[in-house]
Image (cartoon, rainbow, N blue to C red):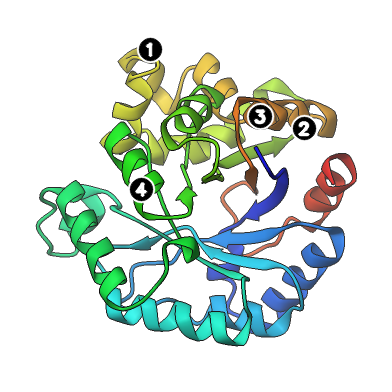
Amino acid sequence: MAQRLVSVWQPFFLACESQGAAIDAATELEDLGYARIWFSGGFGENVAPRFRELLDGTARIGVASGIVSIWHSSPPEVAAFAQDAERAHPGRFLLGFGASHAVVVEGGGTDYRRPYSRMVEYLDGLDAAGLPAERRVLAALGPRMLGLSRDRSAGAHPYFVPAEHTAEARTAIGPDRLLAPEVAVVLDADATTARATARQYTSGYLALPNYTNNLRRFGWTDDDFADGGSDRLVDALIPWGTVEQVAAGLEKHYQAGADEVAIQVLNGGDATTFPADAFRALAAALI
């Protein structure tokens, strides 16, 4: 494990309508020492312009898509965006992309079939467009996607995973690939309210088979998935408590093999407000 990076994963950066407010938040994160800002690529045909706006508005911090959907974007368009960003800001933009979820893809009128084969074709398209493997990562959960992330990209960006998955992913991709899991946290030391905030987040993801099937591989069952997640599952997925307790929960992922942890501060479902105080406190503890 060559790195130990502390990064940010926050929906605010896509949801915020004010470019200036997004850049102000990114600049503060840069000043605090965070390594990279991750946020969703959305479901448009092109990479959201906000990624480039943040690169242009900051000096050092990395920016990454977590993720661009392979069903909603084309390899030539995505590669062109990443190549342009690389020319303007060498080494700072990382393209994260993934197979998304059947309910999302089919809800938009596309047939969600053979996602692994679709990913292979997408990677072939990126190769043909000239985007090098070191500027891209896969949103990989299961063994086959982890294998692709090892063989055809810079590494893996798993989402909604416990530390046990991080350990498995490190074994699967080997010691030399980037492993950057997203980990959501709640800065609240009250068990009742912290878990309630966590369940506002977990409820939606536990309705998606890609995530529940992945969790089943680690022994979780339907009983754990009900009603937003059992206490045991919520506690395994979402570090909560004081800053020190949350830092200890994040440390489990580093100990399991993560090079980089992309921290998502849960904000009661409010994607338009940036939780600046929480990231300041976490920076003081982690960076």
Q: Nearer the viewer, residue 188 or 63?
A: 63
Question: Where residue 227 sits in the image (x, y, percent)?
Answer: 41, 24
Q: CA distance from mark 2 to mark 4?
A: 32 Å
Q: Which mark is residue 219?
A: 1
Residue 224, compared with residue 201, is above or below; it is: above
**Residue 111 placement, left or right of 16:** left
Residue that badge 3 annotates: 239
Q: Amino acid at mark 4?
A: Asp
Taking the spot 31% from the left edge, 32% from the top edge, the residue there is 143
**Residue 137 placement, left or right of 4:** left
Of badges 1 and 4, the one in the foreground is 4
Q: Quarter of the image holding residue 50?
A: bottom right
Residue that badge 4 annotates: 151
Q: Earlier in the sequence, mark 1 or mark 4?
A: 4
Q: Amino acid at mark 3?
A: Pro
Residue 116, compared with residue 222, is above or below; it is: below
Of badges 3 and 1, the one in the foreground is 1
Residue 247, compared with residue 268, is above or below; it is: above
Q: Which mark is residue 138?
A: none
Q: Quarter of the image holding residue 30?
A: bottom right
Question: Where residue 233 sits in the image (x, y, percent)?
Answer: 50, 20
Residue that badge 2 annotates: 247
Q: Amino acid at mark 1?
A: Gly
Q: Are marks 3 and 1 in contact (CB under 8 Å)?
A: no
Q: CA distance from mark 2 to mark 1?
A: 25 Å
Taking the spot 49% from the left edge, 86% from the top edge, the residue there is 84
Residue neighbourhood size for the residue with mark 2, other residues' Cα within 10 Å, grouped as few (<14), some (14–19), many (≥20): some
Of badges 2 and 3, the one in the foreground is 2
Taking the spot 29% from the left edge, 27% from the top edge, the residue there is 213
Q: Earlier in the sequence, mark 2 or mark 4?
A: 4
Residue neighbourhood size for the residue with mark 3, other residues' Cα within 10 Å, grouped as few (<14), some (14–19), many (≥20): many
